[in-house]
Image (cartoon, helix red, strand yellow):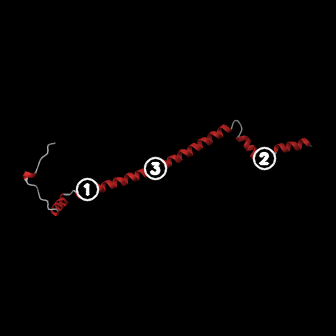
């Protein structure tokens, strides 16, 4: 009778303990550890990729903004250096066209 009760006690192993014994066995643990490390590396690389995508998007927006500013500045420069505006300013300050004697050609 005592042996029968011992057998029934040995068969009633806790499922959590059995799972722990299987996972941490010498045959399964290296695989579990390998998959865990690979999964962790995959997640880290994906996070780094997303972070770099955000940075690239930010830099591209900055490039577009600077390009637009550059175009606006070129347009402003063209307006300020227009012949019509310069003639108007020359008239405002009393400047006249130079005579032929006043023109000096500089050599290159």
Q: Is the residue marked by circle 2 packed among few (<14), some (14-19), or many (20+) residues within 10 Å?
A: few
| Residue that carries the numbered disc 1 in the rendered image | 77
Q: Looking at this view, is 81 or 24 the one in front? A: 81
| Residue 14 appears left or right of 45 | right
Are circles 2 and 1 on residues that touch, CB within 8 Å? no
Q: Residue at x 46, y 50 (%)?
A: 55
Characterize the local packing of mark 1: few (<14), some (14-19) or many (20 or more) Cα atoms within 10 angstroms: few
Q: How many C-alpha atoms fall within 10 Å of the one at disc 3: few (<14), some, or many (≥20)? A: few
Residue 55: numbered disc: 3
Is there CB contact under 8 Å for labels 3 and 1? Answer: no
- Between the C-alphas of marks 2 and 1, the distance is 83 Å
Q: Position of residue 23 (x, y in %)?
A: 70, 41
Chain-order first, disc 2 or disc 1: 2
Judged left or right of residue 10, residue 28 is: left
Residue reaching furthest bottom?
Answer: 92
Quarter of the picture containing the N terminus is top right
Name the spot of residue 45 as percent of width and height, x first. Answer: 53, 44
Q: Residue at x 59, y 41 (%)?
A: 38
**Callout 3: SS:** helix
The residue identified by callout 2 is 14
Screen quadrant of the C terminus: top left
Compare marks 2 and 3 and give the one earlier in the sequence: 2
Q: CA distance from mark 2 to mark 3?
A: 51 Å
Of circles 3 and 1, which is in front? 1
């Amino acid at each position: 009778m005592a042996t029968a009760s011992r057998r029934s006690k040995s068969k009633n192993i806790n499922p959590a303990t059995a799972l722990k014994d299987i996972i941490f066995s010498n045959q399964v643990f290296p695989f579990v550890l390998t998959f865990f490390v690979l999964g962790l590396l995959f997640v880290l690389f994906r996070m780094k990729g997303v972070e770099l995508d955000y940075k690239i998007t930010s830099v591209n927006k900055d490039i577009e903004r600077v390009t637009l500013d550059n175009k606006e500045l070129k347009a402003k420069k063209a307006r300020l250096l227009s012949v019509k505006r310069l003639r108007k300013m020359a008239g405002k300050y009393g400047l006249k066209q130079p005579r032929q004697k006043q023109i000096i050609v500089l050599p290159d």
